[in-house]
Amino acid sequence: MKPFKTNYYLIIAHMILLGFQLYFWNFIIDDAFISFRYAKNLYQHHQLVFNVNEMPVEGYSNFLWIIWLTFGFLMNIEPIFFSKISGMIFSHLIIYVLYKLGLLIGKSKRTSAIITIFYTFLPNIALWSIGGLETSLFSLLLLIAIYFFISDIKRNNNYLIFLSSFFFALASLTRHEGLLLFIASIGFFIGIKIRERSVFKSKSLIKVMIFVSCILFIYGSYFLWRLIYYNSFFPQTFIAKQESITLIVVIEQIVFYLPLIVILSPTFLLILSKTRKIQNITQLDSIKIYLLSLFIMMAFVLLILSSWMPGFRFTIPILPFLLLLIPESLDFFNWLAKRYQEDISPLKYGRSFTITMICLSNLLLLLSFNSYVYRYGVGIAECNITLGKWINANTNQSASLAVWDVGAIPFYANIRTIDIYPKSLQDLHVFNNPEDADYIFTQNITFLILNDEFFAYIKGDGRFTTNYRLIFNAQLFYIENELHVDYIYQVYLHTDYYISNASINELINSSPRFYI
C-alpha cells in the first residue's frame, strides 16, 4: 500500500504541475528572445553575440541555457516551443529530485511526496517552467548538486562529493548565483569537519580538494574563456543592473516580495512550530542548518536583485529549501492531535487540515500575477512578435533597428539592432553614453522604436525630424491593466528606406494594437 500511496501523491504532483503549465502555455517573457538570438547566432554564425560580426558583449547571464537552446536550432525546432518543452521536462524532473531529497532528509515517503505537492501548488513554478528562461534548468541542477552534497554528508563518499561539485559547476554556468551557493556549501562542509575535529585529516583534505577542483576546472575554464572573449570581468547584465544598495532600495524589494511572504506565512509558521523550543541554532540538525543557511543567503541576494517580472522568478530556485524544512513539522501536528484530540476533537484532522491550508495558501499566489501574465502573454504575441515578423518581411539585411525593448522584436526582425535603453545590455557605447544622439544618427538606422520616457535627446534633434517619419504606434498593454498605465511605443522609419503604404496599412488594419 505504501508504494501505491507514494506513487499516488507523486502522480498528483505531476498532474498539478502539468495543469498549471497548460494553463500558462501562452505566456513567454520578452527577455527570453535575447537568449534565443544569442543561441541562433551561435548556431548559424558560430558567434556568441547579439549582433553578428560586431564586438562581443555579454548581454546575458544564462550561458548553459543558451548552449542548450542551440540544440533546438540544430534540430530545427521553433525556439519558443523548444524552450517551453525543455522547461516542462526539467520541472517534472525537479519533482523527482525534490522527492528524493525529502526522503533523504526526512525518511518518510508520504511526507516527501506531500512536499512535492506543496511545491507544485505554487503556480509560479509552472509559470517559469514555460516562460522561456533558464529557471527550471538552474533549479534542477542546483537541487541535484545539493542532493549529492547531503548524500555525501550522510554516507561519506568521494564519488558523491565529485558529483555534487560537477552539478554545482553546471548550475553556476546556468546562473552565476550557483557559484555563491557552492561557496556556501564548501564553507559548511569545512565547518562540519571542524566540528568533528577532522578537518586536517587526509581524507577530509582530499574531499575538499575534489569538491573544489571539479568546479574550479569547469567554471574556471568558462570564466577564462569569457574573460578573453568578452574582455570583461563581469557580465554586462551584472554591470547594467547594478544599483547602489540603499535603505530605499531594500524597502522597495521587501514591498515587492511582500505578497509572496504573506502567502508563504503558513509554511513559515509550520516550520517555526517545530523549532519553538530550540534556544540555539546549533541544536538543529546539521542538514536543516545547511538548507536554512542557503535559503537565508539567497534571500539576502534577492534584496539587491531588481526584478520586474511576474511570479517572483528569482525566488523559485530557493523555494525547495524552505519546503524541505517542513517534514518534521508535519509530525509535530500529528503529535499535537494525539495529545489534545480528546479535548479538541477537530485536532484529529490536524495533519489533513494543515496540508490543505498550505496548498490553498500557495495557490493564492495565482491572484498576484494571473491577470498581468495573461495580458502580457497576449501582448507579446499580438504586438512584439507580429511587429518583428513584419519588419523582417519588409526589409533586407542592409536594414537596421534601434529599439529600447530588446527581445521579440529584434529576434524576429533578424536585422542589426542597437539596444538604446539607457542601461543598455547589448551596446556598451549606449551604456557608457546613454544620450549620444550622434551615435544613433551617424549610422542611418532604418527603424527607430521609441517611447515617451527616455528619448527626448533623439526626438529633439534636428536630424530626427528631417530623416524620420512616424509610421504607426504599437501598444503592448492597454490602460486597463492592473498597473493602470499604457505600454506604447512609436515606430519611426527612415525616409530613405522604402516600405509601401499598402504594407503599413495592412499591419495597421490587422490589429488594434497598431494605429496612427
Image (cartoon, helix red, strand yellow):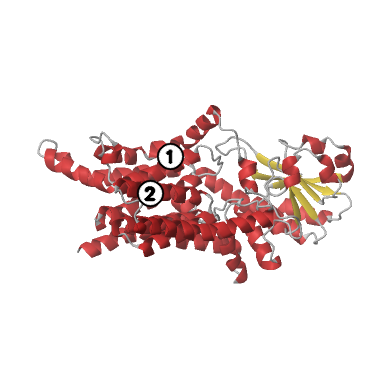
Left or right of 478 in this view: 190 = left
Image location (x, y in percent) of residue 230: 68, 54
Give coordinates of residue 104: x percent, y percent.
29, 57
Residue 381: which quarter of the image?
bottom right
Q: Amino acid at mark 2?
A: Ile
On the question of residue 121 being in view, the answer is no
Which percent across, then down, holds residue 275? Answer: 26, 38
Asked whether residue 419 is in view, the answer is: yes
In the image, is 242 to the left or to the right of 251?
right
Mark 1 falls on what kind of element?
A: helix
Q: Is residue 285 left or right of residue 434?
A: left
Dot 1 or dot 2: first in sequence order is 2
Q: What amino acid type should be assigned to the residue bearing mark 1?
A: Leu
Q: Is residue 281 shown above or below 32?
A: above
Which of 6 and 344 lies nearest the eye of the viewer? 6
Give the mark toward the camera: 1 or 2: 2
Image quadrant containing the C terminus: top right
> How busy is the neighbourhood of tag 1: few (under 14 within 10 Å), some, or many (20 plus)?
some
Q: Nearer the viewer, residue 364 or 258?
A: 258
In the picture as drawn, the residue positioned furthest to the left comes out as: 342
- Residue 113 in the figure: left or right of residue 310: left
Q: Nearer the viewer, residue 140 or 448?
A: 140
From the image, tell me which residue sits under label 1.
260
The residue pinned by badge 2 equals: 190
Of all residues, the one furthest to the top in this rendering is 247
Identify the secondary structure beneath mark 2: helix
Q: Residue at x 34, y 55 (%)?
A: 201
Separation (CA) of disc 1 from disc 2: 33 Å
Q: Position of residue 68 (x, y in %)?
A: 56, 63
Q: Residues within 10 Å of mark 2 (few under 14, many from 20)?
A: some
**Which residue is rendered at x = 65% and y = 51% of the image?**
59
Q: How many marks?
A: 2
